[in-house]
């Protein structure tokens, strides 16, 4: 159904995926379209300085779905099948941060209207906001600004921010507390995937070696 002559893409994997889907597996004869790799896409940013304190910092990024729509995308279905996914993600990382006395920085994607908020997600963030070593910042801050001002980035697979952090030369990893995803999934685009809390703690300690 896609017949455009030009595609703007982030990664080589995007090109491979589109060629496989649009050309190699097509019942129609199609010529190869033009692929233009554009790199990181910058968005608006809040014109305020981030004050993250003096501790070593880990920025956390997740995917928050706001409608119960299983089957519409891989990530949405994954979250639907694992209702405690966000809690497990944050709770395990927060436990590591408390053990190592690190500051967790959480930037949600955007401010939401009340009619599309999911109550259990909002309850989770209220609990996190009261937790030791957690700072939830204004979501209007650019994700890239947060990345550049933090020491490490841990993301939920396979958010684009995890890949962006790697491109910005920040230590970046995907964390899968469900242990359901392949560690070598192409969607990771070269970012390591860790699915074990002990291994994640080792990764954090290695990246902050001699600093904690």
Image: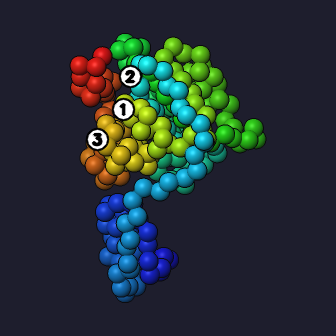
Earlier residue among tags 3 and 1: 1
Q: How crowded is mark 1: few (under 14 residues within 10 Å), some or many (20 or more)?
A: many
Q: How crowded is mark 2: few (under 14 residues within 10 Å), some or many (20 or more)?
A: some
The residue sitting at 35% across, 15% down in the picture is 100
Residue 127 appears in the rendering: yes
Question: Is 120 placed left or right of 76 in the picture?
Answer: right
Q: How far apart are marks 3 and 1 (CA)?
A: 13 Å
The residue sitting at 46% across, 51% down in the picture is 74
Question: Foreground mark, 2 or 1?
Answer: 2
Q: Where is residue 66 in the image (x, y as percent from the top left)?
A: 63, 43
Q: Is mark 3 on a helix, strand or loop?
A: strand
In front here: 89 or 132? 132
Earlier residue among tags 2 and 3: 2
For residue 136, which quarter of the picture?
Answer: top right
Q: What element carries label 1?
A: strand
Q: Distance between the residues labelled 2 and 3?
A: 21 Å
Return the residue at label 1. 152
The quadrant of the picture occupied by the C terminus is top left
The residue sitting at 66% across, 40% down in the picture is 111
Residue 196's disc is none
Q: How far apart are marks 2 and 1 (CA)?
A: 9 Å
Return the residue at label 3. 192
Q: Position of residue 129 (x, y in %)?
A: 59, 21
Rendering colour mode: rainbow
Return the residue at label 2. 56
Q: Where is residue 33 in the image (x, y as percent from the top left)?
A: 38, 80
Are the two marked residues, 2 and 1, in contact with CB atoms closer than 8 angstroms?
Answer: yes
Question: Foreground mark, 2 or 3?
Answer: 2
Earlier residue among tags 2 and 1: 2
The residue sitting at 28% across, 49% down in the picture is 190
């Amino acid at each position: 159904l896609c017949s455009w002559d030009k595609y703007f893409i982030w990664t080589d994997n995007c090109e491979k995926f589109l060629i496989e889907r649009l050309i190699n597996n097509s019942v129609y004869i199609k010529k190869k379209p033009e692929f233009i790799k554009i790199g990181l896409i910058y968005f608006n940013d809040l014109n305020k300085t981030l004050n993250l304190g003096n501790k070593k910092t880990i920025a956390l990024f997740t995917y928050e779905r706001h409608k119960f729509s299983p089957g519409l995308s891989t990530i949405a279905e994954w979250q639907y099948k694992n209702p405690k996914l966000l809690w497990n993600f944050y709770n395990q990382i927060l436990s590591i941060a408390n053990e190592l006395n690190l500051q967790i920085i959480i930037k949600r994607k955007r401010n939401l209207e009340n009619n599309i908020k999911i109550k259990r997600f909002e309850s989770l963030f209220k609990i996190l906001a009261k937790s030791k070593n957690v700072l939830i910042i204004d979501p209007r801050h650019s994700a890239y600004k947060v990345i550049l001002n933090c020491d490490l980035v841990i993301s939920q697979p396979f958010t684009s921010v995890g890949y962006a952090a790697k491109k910005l030369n920040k230590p970046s990893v995907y964390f899968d507390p469900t242990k359901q995803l392949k560690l070598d999934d192409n969607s990771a685009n070269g970012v390591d995937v860790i699915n074990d809390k002990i291994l994640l703690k080792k990764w954090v300690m290695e990246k902050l070696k001699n600093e904690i």
